[in-house]
């Protein structure tokens, strides 16, 4: 049986050596060291540069072999031709992990692949495990590590999303855009060529990581595709797994080969295999983020009955069209529920407001809006599996708490679309962090909900 790789020291190292650290702010070695210092890395930092005695107030060492303590993690930022020798030094030093930022390996063809194999041979001499090459590194807020994107690397900024991707651009944007949307991350990895440690290894680790509730990947090529599917089938019984598999066309596959040296297979066949094993498939960056946002809900839908509560008639029409296309049922509320709704709306909304489903309240009161929307939602929630609300109350400071309490009482998911998404970014993030997934459009919300329902059915069938 394959032994599970312990990646704890990758994400929680007590010592980091930055090989290629520099005083030059234009060099990656400077950026890596600066980011680690700015993130208040909670361990010890050791710059490595044979031409410098001191960098940023820290003593510098000629080689990693000269660092006077055991090293858990080496950040390697030197030119590719030097990397095999650096990794050989790491292996002799018994460095546990090395993140190789340097490019110029398998993504360049046969000569680069030969250099990559030389690096791996050196690593195996001392069992040093490698992330990369051709990558940006890791984000681990619990340890104060961030070499990827401008986001706080503090325990207070951590959350339940783990993400790994072969593209630095994708990983950066998942973090930056996701952070704005309210996502908070437990661990993020820019994995590049995945020459040694692969998405399969990370999936296995994220599965047992107590800080992680949702797992996402951007993949250009699987190294051990059959193993990934077997793992995903097990992991998806406990945690949602979302995958954006790129290189879907002949042109995209060629781009993947030159980007990370990946070989892409049939997208249609592999999509089907992923879904059969409980994985939720994304087709682009926006959908990837929307799907992860959807899975921040602590409860999953248990059926396809959808309630629509809107403060914007056009939004309700758009939502109804999208819901019907995706196979959701919009049950007409019972006479009892309609009367309860009418009592709530009386003397508040215009008399032409519809209490059937969709429920269009036209506009709500100017004060007490949070509790008003809770009262409007209650009769609907009794008769549906999920509520989607389009309203202008999201910016009310009390709204997130009030609607979250209703979700917990009913144990049913609630999704929201603000009336003005571009003016409600802070509120959208606050709601998503409260477990109320919030989206820019009804179509985006319902696409995520459809994925949540498919996943819910998968889990229920496997239980």
Image: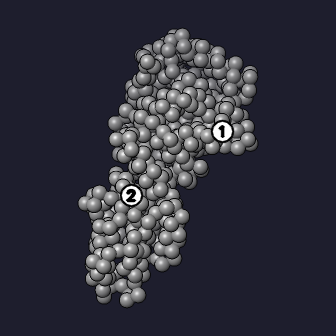
Compare residues 117 and 284 and report the one nearer the observer: 284
Q: Is residue 457 above or below residue 396?
A: above
| Residue 354 position by quadrant | bottom left
Q: Residue at x 43, y 53 (%)?
A: 453
How many numbered tags mark residues here?
Answer: 2
How many residues crowd mark 2 within 10 Å: few (<14), some (14–19), many (20+)? some
Q: Is residue 188 visible?
A: no
Q: Residue at x 43, y 69 (%)?
A: 330
Q: Please state, as top left, top right, bottom left or bottom right, where the C terminus lies in the image.
A: top left
Give the structural element (helix, strand or loop) at label 1: loop
Judged left or right of residue 106, residue 236 is left
| Residue 50 position by quadrant | top right
Judged left or right of residue 310, residue 246 is right
Compare residues 210 and 122 and report the one nearer the observer: 210
Residue 89 % position (x, y)? 55, 13
Judged left or right of residue 216, residue 247 is right
Q: Residue at x 41, y 60 (%)?
A: 304
Q: Is residue 18 above or below residue 463?
A: above
Numbered label attached to residue 303: 2
Mark 2 or 1 closer to N-term? 1
Q: Residue at x 38, y 74 (%)?
A: 332
Residue 65 % position (x, y)? 51, 13
Q: Is residue 96 above or below residue 267?
A: above
Residue 82 % position (x, y)? 65, 19
Q: Which residue is mark 1?
A: 266
Marks 2 and 1: which is nearer the front?
2
Q: Marks 2 and 1, Cα distance to the nearest angstrom? A: 32 Å
Compare residues 116 and 78 and report the one nearer the observer: 116
How many residues crowd mark 1 within 10 Å: few (<14), some (14–19), many (20+)? few
Q: Is residue 298 visible?
A: yes
């Amino acid at each position: 049986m394959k032994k599970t790789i312990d990646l704890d020291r990758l994400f929680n190292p007590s010592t980091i050596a930055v090989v290629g650290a520099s005083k030059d702010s234009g060099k990656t070695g400077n950026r890596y060291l600066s980011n680690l210092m700015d993130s208040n890395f909670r361990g010890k930092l050791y710059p490595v540069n044979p031409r410098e005695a001191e960098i940023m107030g820290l003593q510098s060492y000629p080689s990693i072999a000269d660092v006077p303590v055991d090293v858990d993690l080496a950040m390697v930022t030197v030119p590719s031709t030097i990397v095999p020798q650096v990794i050989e030094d790491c292996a002799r030093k018994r460095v546990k992990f090395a993140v190789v930022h340097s490019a110029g390996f398998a993504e360049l063809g046969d000569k680069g692949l030969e250099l990559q194999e030389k690096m791996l041979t050196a690593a195996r001499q001392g069992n040093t495990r490698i992330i990369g090459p051709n990558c940006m590194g890791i984000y681990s807020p619990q340890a104060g590590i961030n070499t990827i994107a401008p986001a706080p690397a503090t325990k207070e900024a951590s959350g339940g999303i783990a993400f790994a991707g072969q593209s630095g651009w994708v990983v950066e944007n998942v973090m930056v855009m996701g952070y704005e949307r309210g996502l908070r991350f437990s661990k993020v990895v820019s994995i590049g060529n995945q020459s040694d440690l692969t998405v399969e290894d990370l999936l296995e680790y994220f599965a047992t990581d107590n800080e992680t509730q949702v797992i996402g990947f951007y993949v250009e090529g699987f190294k051990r595709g059959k193993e990934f599917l077997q793992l995903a089938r097990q992991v998806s019984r406990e945690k949602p797994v979302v995958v954006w598999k790129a290189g879907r066309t002949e042109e995209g596959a060629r781009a993947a080969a030159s980007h990370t040296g990946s070989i892409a297979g049939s997208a249609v066949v592999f999509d089907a295999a992923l879904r059969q094993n409980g994985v939720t498939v994304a087709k682009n960056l926006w959908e990837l983020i929307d799907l992860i946002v959807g899975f921040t809900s602590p409860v999953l839908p248990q059926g396809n009955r959808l309630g629509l509560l809107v403060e914007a008639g056009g939004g309700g029409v758009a939502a109804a069209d999208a819901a019907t296309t995706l196979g959701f049922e919009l049950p007409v509320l019972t006479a009892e529920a309609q009367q309860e709704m009418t009592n709530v709306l009386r003397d508040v909304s215009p008399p032409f407001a519809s209490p059937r489903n969709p429920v269009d309240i036209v506009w709500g009161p100017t004060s007490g809006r949070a509790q008003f929307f809770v009262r409007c939602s209650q009769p609907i929630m009794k008769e549906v599996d999920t509520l989607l609300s389009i309203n202008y109350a999201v910016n009310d400071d009390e709204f997130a708490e009030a609607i979250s309490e209703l979700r917990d009482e009913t144990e049913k998911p609630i999704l929201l679309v603000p009336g003005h998404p571009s003016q409600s970014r802070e509120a959208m993030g606050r709601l998503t962090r409260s477990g109320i997934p919030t989206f820019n459009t009804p179509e985006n919300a319902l696409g995520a909900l459809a994925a949540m329902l498919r996943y819910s059915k998968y889990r229920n069938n496997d239980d």
